[in-house]
Image (cartoon, grey):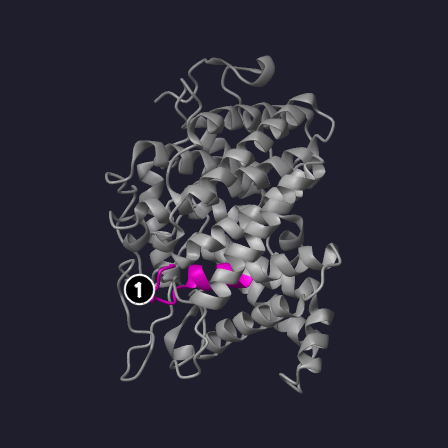
Amino acid sequence: MDRRKFIRVTGISGVTLSGFMPFLSCTGNEPKLEEELKEQALLAFKRFEEVWDFFDFWKRGNTFDACLVFANAMQQRWPNDPQVKEMNEKIVKMLEQNLAFFKSVKVEVMWADDFGWWGLMALNARKLLLNMDEVELADKYWKLSNDLCWEYKKNTAYDHTEDAKPVPHGCRNGDAAGQSLGVKNTVTNVLLFLLSSRIYRVAKEESREDTDKYLDMVYRQWIWFTDWFKLDEYEFLKELSTEGALVQERPIAMFEGSGYTDKIHPPWAEGWVWTGDQGMLVAALTDMIAVKEDLASFIGRNNLDAEFDANTFETQAKTIIQQIGKGVQNAMVGNADGLIREAPCFSSFGPAHGGDYLAGRGIMMRYLGSSQEKALLGVNLDEAAVKTAKAIWETRNLENNQFQPEYTSAENDKLYIKQFLELWGLADDIQEWDLNTMPEDHKEGVCQAVGMDIIGAAIKTLK
């Protein structure tokens, strides 16, 4: 496809985008770049309006969360723009439909991590709805996040037993009906971690009562992750050969009596790392640092750790954040093209669950593009965000502004696989997502959400 092909597309309220619109700079203060980003964002949302309403529980929760964070970035940048206001009014109507969808679903056949995605989305929905003075609908989304999603993960998916080895507790990714306990993979655990920390911060801001239960789960998940990270032989937080580290998608410990030996659902392979985990873990740790004094008070009141010190904790959490930041910069941004990529792991790209892990790059930047996370990350990913937004825009379907699963070149893909292999020690020779079993409408919705996540991160680079 000739990326310079002339196009003219009409978007929201007559927005037009003419010709090839290059991102020549990422310094963030050029009026032309800002105007181009705004027009592209509006057209990206226009396409999302056409593809968001599909039937898939977790993907629908995740893609709409992408839309809400993207909309917040636009609102922060252009608070008085009439087209942005019109977009938000449309999102309110979409949220009414989404709530009806949730109520129509047989939740007993859904998986534990699904409720994490919906819980996080519901908190962002509440934020937008309160800003739009839609208090009644906002309260319904609070109940969805807290009373349904968080309570389910805490009561049903969390492992309350003490005998799991080598690390007790954690969150299982089983189904709501209890037919399958599921595996304790990273994504479901980091979702419980992040949902707990985000609910706590909202509850505190709104002066709600009975908030210790959220801090309790935040602390429990902090212990689960850090206990694993201390076990160097399993490399759950694995260092690169140069600088930085990445958290793997599942902790595995193969010994008799271990509770972490399951390699199915989804199929696991050694060295599997997923972009989405990096962003969510950094976000949860950032939340913890923001409420470190509250956490210390809770731990003291409940005699959980007599040696816990808020400042020591902050240093430890920041170290992990910066390790991951450097890991993302060195191993998930291609040296040849500067684009944000998915680690070349067949477990992410393959036919079994490629449609699920496709969203990872966007999810990562949904969080790493946030100002609070950026302040602690220790690296600057702004240039990568802007370059990736450019690549996603240039490779879209010119007829309808639909974003694609791949936005990189085969030549640079090969160089990236070599780069990742040298840093990580393991890599699969895989360049394209196997989405043959993924319904077309699901694929379009997820790909559009990935693009909106990246464009939202690019908008946040503007000064």
On-image quarter of the N terminus: top left
Judged left or right of residue 246, residue 303 is right
On-image quarter of the C terminus: top right
Task: Kindly identify the residue that appears in the image at 30 percent across and 65 percent down.
Answer: 270
Residue 279 in the image, given as x and y percentages of width and height: 52, 54
| Whether residue 18 is situated above or below residue 92 in the rendered picture | above
What's the magenta region? 176-193
Q: Is residue 63 magenta?
A: no
Judged left or right of residue 253, residue 112 is right
Number of other residues with Cα within 10 Å of mark 1, as a class: few under 14, some 14 to 19, many 20 or more: few
Secondary structure type for disc 1: loop
To which residue does mark 1 refer?
180
Judged left or right of residue 243, residue 379 is right
| Whether residue 186 is situated above or below residue 26 in the rendered picture | below
Question: 24 or 370: which is nearer to us?
Answer: 370
Rendering quarter of residue 164: bottom left
User: Going by the picture, which residue comes out furthest to the bottom?
Assistant: 306
- Please say whether residue 239 is visible from this viewpoint: no
Task: Kindly identify the residue that appears in the image at 69 percent across and 75 percent down.
Answer: 298
| Whether residue 78 is situated above or below residue 385 in the rendered picture | above
- Please say whether residue 456 is visible from this viewpoint: yes
Residue 77 in the image, given as x and y percentages of width and height: 69, 34
Question: 174 or 151: which is nearer to us?
Answer: 151
The image shows a total of numbered marks equal to 1
Q: Is residue 192 magenta?
A: yes
Residue 462 in the image, given as x and y percentages of width and height: 67, 36
Task: Kindly identify the residue that appears in the image at 64 percent across and 43 percent down.
Answer: 138
Residue 261 in the image, given as x and y percentages of width and height: 29, 73
| Whether residue 356 is situated above or below residue 257 in the rendered picture | above
Task: Kindly identify the residue that appears in the image at 67 percent across and 87 percent down.
Answer: 306
Question: 38 or 110: which is nearer to us?
Answer: 110
- Amino acid on which disc 1 is placed: Ser
